[in-house]
Image (spheres, grey):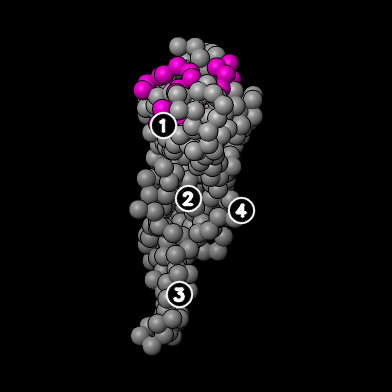
Amino acid sequence: MKRNPRGWLVASLVCVVLATSCDCGSEKEEADPGTGGSGAPPPLAGDTQDVDGQEVTLEITEVFTRLVGTAPPRTSFVTTEETVAHAAVRGGEAGLTERIRWTVKPVGTHTGPATPAEATGAELAFRGTSALPITGARDPNPPLEYEVTATLDVAGRTLEAKLPATSFIRQEEADIVRQEYLDYGTTFKPALANVRVPGRTTLNRGNYSVIVEEKPGELDRLLLDMEKELNRLLNDDVQVVPVGTRVASPSSLVVSPGGSVLMLGPLGDTEPKGDDVCAGVRVGNGCAGAIRAGPNRIADTPANNRKTQVSLESIITSAYRNPQRNKFIGSGTINSRHTRGLALDLDPRSLVIPGKDARQLMCLVELAGIRVAGEDNSFSENGPVTFLDCNDPAADHVHVQR
């Protein structure tokens, strides 16, 4: 578990609140030269030795990532951020702090060398580098991590304070994902604010429990906008003649289909009632055309009586993909909208809607995407790179992006 190098502030505030039962700041503690009092946080690592009859202590006092606007201080990082460590010496002659030597060692072959790898003085400031492959993967990357050691030579003795990598300077999951974008050289470089745990697990087709969105919350908005528009298209038939009205002829139009659906033309979404007649073809036990009055010449059919309501979450085949996963599935661009949390892939072929076959559903979903995101941002595909007409039997999903 990571230690908060400034967690003592929290403890001090608690003592203020619980003043009746806490003796924080007592004379005994203020006079205590050790590290357990209220005047300073405990060291993160240290070494004490007897030097010519006097105790000398080398301590690493804090480590943090120099990243403006983060609180509490972090020790996770990406390679564009600077990691800082501070050390101090208690006891011994003056000037020992300036003689502290630092070394930074990468842990594992996937972690590149630190820059710089050595320093002298009270402060160490370095940046990491990555040796991770960018060949595509469906498994998460290991974290970059570093072992930091401070040493001090005094009168023939060497004091050593070491920070184990697994406790301190080690990437957390959010930064492992952010590191991929740096390693791949993508145009979009996510900040911590762009990383979140999705409310819908179906929106995550990446290798981690978190997703990255260039516009936080955009995937949820895109999905909801698509659902709203598709359901509107599935309930857009027009009541030409009010129910119960006598018309001039059995062939008189009672209900008209909605607007044209791409190259398929109008598609009806209403079932005839009474002796009204489906004027178009029947698909999947449903009428796919207009409704006519029938022998009694009375309009019996209310428009949109199917009241179709479709949820698209079950037909998501891809949404967010991290760069490694995006490369693994064969995407042709490192700057894919999927890696930016701006795209959905939807396969409507599994939907069961009366009067609609697979190609009609594909075209309806593509049209919904055009209405939501624009003509250039909604199209049918086979796989990640083959573009097709929506009524092509080979089309296996609709890609829609913002």
Q: Provide residue 133's location: percent of width, then percent of height.
A: 46, 24
| First to last magenta residue range | 262-285
Numbered disc 3: secondary structure: helix
Please tell me how crowded label 2 is: few (under 14), some (14-19), or many (20+) other residues with Cα within 10 Å: many
Report x, y in % for residue 378.
58, 25
Mark 4: amino acid? Val
Pointer 4 residue: 68
Q: Is the Cβ of the residue at disc 4 closer than 8 Å to that at disc 3? A: no
- Mark toward the start of the polypeptide (1 vs 2): 2
Q: If you read the primary sequence from the N terminus, does the residue marked by circle 4 or circle 1 appear first?
A: 4
Residue on which disc 2 sits: 75
Provide the secondary structure element on which disc 1 rests.
loop
Residue position marked by numbered label 1 in the rendering: 273
Are discs 3 and 1 less than 8 Å apart at CB?
A: no
Q: Please identify, in this view, whether the residue under mark 1 or under mark 2 is nearer the observer.
A: 1
Q: Amino acid at mark 2?
A: Thr
Task: Inspect this view and state whether residue 285 appears.
Answer: yes
Residue at mark 3 to residue at mark 2: CA–CA distance: 22 Å
Of 47 and 332, the residue lying toward us = 332
**Label 3 amino acid?**
Ser
For this rendering, which residue is in front, 253 or 66? 253
Image depth: mark 4 or mark 1 in front: 1
